[in-house]
Image (cartoon, rainbow, N blue to C red):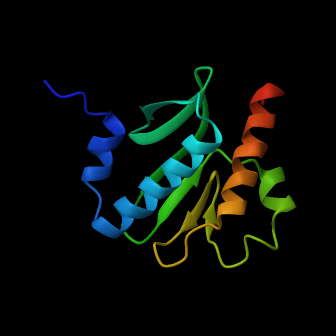
Amino acid sequence: MTDTSPIDVYLATRPADQREALQHLRAQIKRLVPHATESMTYGMPTIKVDGRGLLLFAGWKAHCSVYGLSDAFIAEHADELKGFERTKGSLHFTTDAPFRESLVEEMVRSRLADLEAGV
């Protein structure tokens, strides 16, 4: 019997370019928060800290998305986020234009602070 993560199963369903981009994002987050756990929430890969959702991510037809960022984070990083589309609750990126490593670090730091503050 294999011990395949539900996130690995999800990523296997995505096109190769999305799978690679999302796997890279997953690895970045896990590197920054090595004690985090993984699960699926609302059908999307979820990175959790102490049982609470840190960030969710998913691949869609024309883009990938990250979920869990606050409006305050979006406003605070408006200049860095120029060119990235968003909808309420999500920030979109494409495999041709992924998030910079430093932006992912800011996302994780911001979400960790939110969780610590009980947000």
Up/down of 59 relative to 113, above or below: below
92 relative to 11 in the view: left or right = right
State the residue lying farthest toward the top. Answer: 50
Judging depth in this view, the residue of 90 and 112 nearest the camera is 112
Number of numbered discs present? 0
Residue drawn at point x = 29 percent, y = 58 percent:
14
The image quadrant of residue 59 is bottom left
Up/down of 88 relative to 36, above or below: below
15 relative to 27 in the view: left or right = left
Q: Position of residue 5 (x, y in %)?
A: 32, 33
- The N terminus - image quarter: top left
Up/down of 80 relative to 89, above or below: below
Residue drawn at point x = 84 percent, y = 27 percent:
117
62 relative to 119 in the view: left or right = left
101 relative to 27 in the view: left or right = right
Residue drawn at point x = 49 percent, y = 72 percent:
94
Residue drawn at point x = 64 percent, y = 43 percent:
32
State the residue lying farthest toward the left. Answer: 1
- The C terminus - image quarter: top right
Judging depth in this view, the residue of 90 and 15 nearest the camera is 15
Judging depth in this view, the residue of 27 and 118 nearest the camera is 27
Q: Position of residue 50 (x, y in %)?
A: 62, 20
The image quadrant of residue 75 is bottom right
Q: Position of residue 106 (x, y in %)?
A: 76, 53
Q: Position of residue 27 (x, y in %)?
A: 50, 49
